[in-house]
Amino acid sequence: MGARMLDYLGYCFTPGNVRMRKSIKQNFARKAKRIKSKKRRKEVLASYWGWCKWADCRHLWNVITDNDMSFAEHGIVGRIETKDGKKFFDMEKVNLEEIVKDDITILDYESDVKTQYGGGRCVVKIIHQGSEKKFITNSFTIKAMLQQAREQKLFPIQTRVLKKPIEKGRYDFYFE
């Protein structure tokens, strides 16, 4: 025995399914086809997107709008640079302490990055244990070594991170 459909607030509810009322779908299709102004079309589509997202209407949306919401199909990708033109490495961040004495491959770096701890930091993109990661440092030794490696065009380069004590409880990190 099938359950009865409830029709209210512009939706038709059945167990396990929510659909949009047929008259709303038809009005949506007519308006989407008729509107020429890009600005007005954007406003109308935004209002109907609210209807479609709460109903099970993803396919209806894609058919009527020619999938205007899909960034991937339009070739749009996320930013790989920050507002100030610096490279942004979108990956897991590790602490230098975690990779001391481990083999790593340095792929790239970005200098003079501002973080919550201050400016002038260096973000280094590495491969550690088979996955890409990054670490942030303010070590003058590491920054100088990275600058020299870039000038000599050595990237990617395999190395290790080591540390040496400089004061009571403080360490300086450097590459092997």
Image: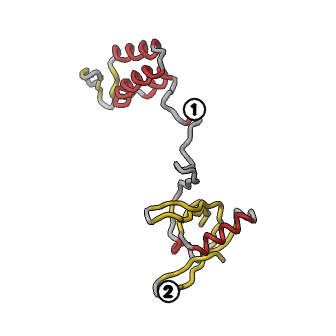
Query: In this rendering, is residue 64 above or below 163?
Result: above
Picture quadrant of residue 20: top left
Which sits in the foreground, 172 or 44?
172
- Mark drawn on residue 2: none
Image quadrant containing the N terminus:
top left
Which sits in the foreground, 18 or 148?
148
Query: Label 1 belongs to which residue?
Result: 74
Query: In this rendering, is residue 81 above or below 117?
Result: above
Which sits in the foreground, 116 or 25?
116
* Nearer-N-terminus badge (2/1): 1
At which x and y percent is residue 32? 44, 17
Other-residue count near label 1 (Cα within 10 Å), few / some / many at <14 / 14–19 / ≥20: few
Other-residue count near label 2 (Cα within 10 Å), few / some / many at <14 / 14–19 / ≥20: few
At which x and y percent is residue 9? 25, 23
At 62% from the left edge and 61% from the top edge, which residue is drawn? Answer: 109
Query: Label 2 belongs to which residue?
Result: 167
Give yes or no for contact between labels 2 and 1 (Cβ–Cβ under 8 Å).
no
At which x and y percent is residue 128? 60, 66
At 45% from the left edge and 22% from the top edge, which residue is drawn? Answer: 39
At which x and y percent is residue 176? 66, 77
Query: In this rendering, is residue 12 above or below 94?
Result: above
Q: Secondary structure at mark 2?
A: strand
Type of amino acid under label 2: Glu
Q: CA distance from mark 2 to mark 1?
A: 55 Å
Type of amino acid under label 1: His
Q: Secondary structure at mark 1?
A: helix
At 39% from the left edge and 26% from the top edge, which residue is drawn? Answer: 46
In this view, the mark in front (2 or 1): 2
Q: Is residue 154 left or right of residue 140?
A: right
